[in-house]
Image: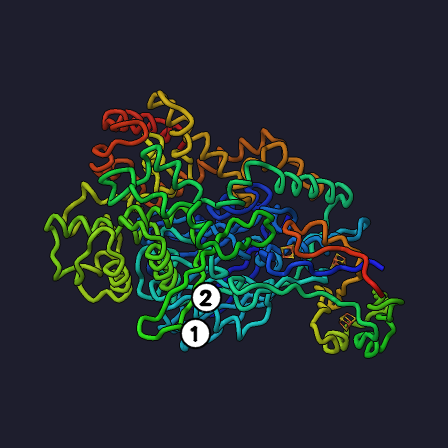
Amino acid sequence: MKRLVVEDIEKCVGCGLCMFACSRKFAKRPEIGNSSSAILPVSLSGFERGATVIFCRACEEPPCAQVCPSGALKPKKGGGVVYVESLCLGCHYCVEACTLNAIFVREDGKIAVCIHCGYCADYCPHGVIAYKEVEA
Amino acid sequence: MRDAVLIIDLDNYTYEVEHRPDLFEKWLGGTGVAVQLMREHMNPKADPLSPENVIVFATGPLTPAYPLASKTVAMFKSPLTGNLGESHAGGRTATSIAAAGYGAIVIKGASKKPVYLVVENDKVYFRDGRVLWGIPDSLIVGRIIAENEPGRGTRTMMRIGGAGEKLVRYSCVTTETYRHYGRLGLGAVFGSKKLKALIVRGRKKYLPADAKKYREVYDEIYRMAIESDAMKKYHLLGTAANVIPLNELKALPTRNLKVARFERAEEISGEALAEYNLGRRIACSHCPVACIHLAALRLPYENEPYFFRTIMISYDYELIYSLGSMLGIGNRDDLLRLIHRVETYGLDAMSTGVCLAWATEALERGIVSEKDTLVKLAFGDVECYLKAIDFIYEQPTDFYRHLAMGVSHAAEVYGGKEFALAFGGNEMPGYHTGYAAVLNYLTGMRHSHLDSAGYSLDQKAKDLSPEETIDRLIEEESWRQTLSSLVVCFFARGIYTPEVISKAFEPLGYSISPDELKKLGREIYREKARLKVDLGFSLDELSIPKRIFETPSLHGKLSENFVNKALEYYRKKLMEML
Ligand code: SF4
Ligand code: SF4
Ligand code: SF4
């Protein structure tokens, strides 16, 4: 199973290219901006101290799906979640449930969560993140 | 095109949003739009430090669609020169303003008490800034606000340090800690409005008109950005790569430009900094290049063994020139300490360095005394300069009060104009390359080396006539008006050719040909020249410090006659244009 992984966080320059890429990920309806981005590079109180890249780590037993009242988030085989946008109420229970804060609120109030498609990895100019085969 | 303009009035703590498709369709964004907004909102006679002054932040139509469209243009009336102030910065300013939904933000009036502003999508919050006022260290101010405000990772936070509060005419606005609206005193304009910081955050999305084409053009520009040689220079050593070549060309102003070659240039070169100090590199939002170089400076505590502090300091060519060679500082640790001090107060490094270099020579010549300067300023002596930077902020004597108003002003009061290195009131950038550079400083719309890149023309072409030099400078500056209306990083100018820009617009649903883009640049140039003249710009008031003609440049000793001829020709061109 292929997953988005962090290879070397120390090389992150905070450019946000991964974040902008994520909003472009659907070939049929790419968006400009970061509203639908499910990945967020942040600094450790200033990039001089280093960075963290926040995205879903594909839990085996996803708490976000457990608290989702509408079935919009469902556990995916092998870990992580499937997101059915049309079912999402915008209640943000999942946002609270994720310990990593890896669920983001879009402009329209619905959510963005990483689906491990790997699109962003090609746009990290510094090899911080990669799309790789991992053991389930 | 994103056409919302947010207008914030600090007099009454109100705001409104205007949609201005007319402005953005005609002038794109950035510089082009900012000029028009200044026209609409500011009285040209306004005192720069009065509530009448206006601050415009304008972003461009390619943000956040494409990489390297990463900058924001700030426009205001400069308290340093009394004329048009324009300064560009990256960080997250552009993408955050776009994410909040705006093409531009206009700030008018002045608050009665200190405030900071938070723009979040459609809302503006006026936050009590009294607790933050008086904290001189802009790094600390940034950290406090960061703890209090949401939007980690996507917000921009522009703020001033103590220098802006104290109205030092060359104080800057710092954003994301390491990027600056450095030149021409935007920090003092913030200070005069009792505005400590401006935070912008949001999460707006935009849709391309042609989805497939958009991703294709994006990929094309991205490839160019990571593969092009043009960008490698900034990627590897950063702008500091220029130290050695400029020194070899005898174009690196040293010790107040008594000479243009620094015997210790190697020690403070981009190569040496990269080898011994480079600790990390970071990028502006949506930029794959990451030209921001941070040096790690490890300093021992004198009386406590095994106790160190390590600070990260961003360096660039201009800082190495102004706080290094210009002050005779050839030790890297010394240089980094000076940069850090300037960063702390939120001062413009170039102006600070030039002011201190002049003060040092003025003291040497006995024009001023140690009673004025309080420390024995001497080229190469870091301790005295560290103290003097504190004094520019604290202004304990008349001398420092005058020095805080710029080197032209100080020389007006004390004498020594011949070696006060400013043009049109703006302290000189670090290129003594020849005629094109000098004419660039004199005629550039903001007297910045980046206006028309005279320093580069000097290196490319010899034996140009005065007329040819002016023509080439105007041509370059005109094209740069298009780039700064887009607003793409000037370092990416090799990528964003007229053809590529035209192509980039297509999937966004806007069509403009390469020729139209060039024509637009010339029109914006003219609009800006008009604004500048309205604000009081006159060629007759320009003067050139004698030192420029005494110290040989890359083009040898410069002749006044050549410069005067060129200026006469420029006057003609300007008249025609207006
Ligand atoms: S969003 Fe958070 S809780 Fe849900 S699967 Fe991913 S990491 Fe786990
Ligand atoms: S892997 Fe796909 S969904 Fe996850 S952050 Fe990257 S682009 Fe977004
Ligand atoms: S693209 Fe890479 S370097 Fe840039 S923010 Fe994302 S992880 Fe960091």
Q: On what subunit does the disc labeled 1 rest? A: B
Q: Secondary structure at mark 1?
A: loop
Question: Given the image, on which type of amino acid does mark 2 rest?
Answer: Ala
Q: Is residue B543 visible?
A: no
Label of residue B129 in the image = 1
Identity of the residue drawn at 43% across and 74% down:
B129
Q: Quadrant of residue A135?
A: bottom right
Crowding near the residue tagged with mark 1, few <14, some 14–19, many ≥20 C-alpha atoms within 10 Å? some
Q: With respect to residue B112, does B386 lie above or below?
A: above
Depth check: B496 or B42 in front?
B496
Residue B228 locus on image (x, y percent): 60, 37
Depth check: B71 or B238 in front?
B238
Depth check: A74 or B87 in front?
A74
Residue B275 locus on image (x, y percent): 46, 50
Q: Would you say B194 lies left or right of B209 here?
A: left
Identity of the residue drawn at 19% across and 51% down:
B360
Residue B94 locus on image (x, y percent): 56, 54
Label of residue B112 in the image = none
